[in-house]
Amino acid sequence: MRTLLSVLVVLAFAIKLLAEDTNSPAPPKTTASAPMKIGTGEATNHYDEVMIVTGRVAQVTIRPRMIFLNLDRAYPDTPFTVVMFPGKYLADAKALEGKAVEIKGKIKNYHDKPEIELDNTNQLTVPGSGIPIIFQEATQPTNAPVVAPSTNAPPPSTESTNFPEIM
């Protein structure tokens, strides 16, 4: 009888503890957690996810309509690329060459290579350097070719060619 009584007391105590756990309010859920930091080699495992990708700028390629930052290795062997399209460009992208950077954004798959499109100054940081990231409005470079309106006749040329004249 004594054992039965002690079992009942322990059982009642256990039920009380379980009841307290179910009546306590649930911890608040966090809807937006900070993105995880990953290296350039891990980016292929995180397509369509927002991450912070860390790496060293191995190559800066400036084209008339876009800028590429290739991290860790130069193109075509780069494991990760940062792309900036028309609109806003880094004021001095070449200054980032050789620097360790962190890029925050959604990782996209472009021709089986991971990349992040950079369109905001908050996406790019140079940890511990104090280098301000300055964007400027994109303009057409002064050395870009000027395209003449299309006509049926070829444009006049002052240069001589190795081709014979056709009469």
Image: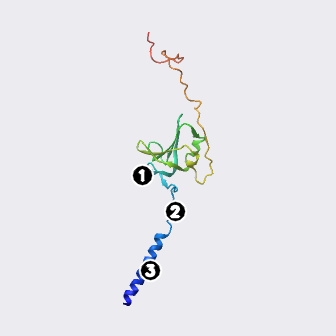
Above or below, 63 against 6 in this view is above
Viewed as shown, does residue 147 lie left or right of 7?
Answer: right
Question: Whole-Å distance between the Cαs marked 1 and 3?
Answer: 48 Å
The three-letter amino acid code for the residue at tag 3 is Phe
Would you name the residue on which mark 1 appears? 45
The N terminus sits in image quarter: bottom left
Where does the image place residue 149, in percent across and percent down from the top left?
53, 20
Kind of element beneath mark 1: helix
**Between disc 1 and disc 2, whose residue precedes?**
2
Q: Residues within 10 Å of mark 3 (few under 14, many from 20)?
A: few
Where does the image place residue 18, in percent across and percent down from the top left?
44, 74
Kind of element beneath mark 3: helix
Where does the image place residue 69, in percent across and percent down from the top left?
52, 43
**Between disc 1 and disc 3, whose residue precedes?**
3
- Residue found at the very far bottom of the displayed protein: 2
Question: Whole-Å distance between the Cαs marked 1 and 2?
Answer: 29 Å
- Residue found at the very far top of the displayed protein: 167
Number of the front mark, 1 or 2: 2
Which residue does the image show at 58% across and 53% down from the upper left?
127
Which residue does the image show at 51% across and 48% down from the upper left?
105
Which residue does the image show at 58% across and 36% down from the upper left?
138
Of 89 and 159, which appears nearest the observer?
A: 89
Would you name the residue on which mark 3 appears? 13
Residue 105 numbered mark, or none = none
Q: Residues within 10 Å of mark 2 (few under 14, many from 20)?
A: few
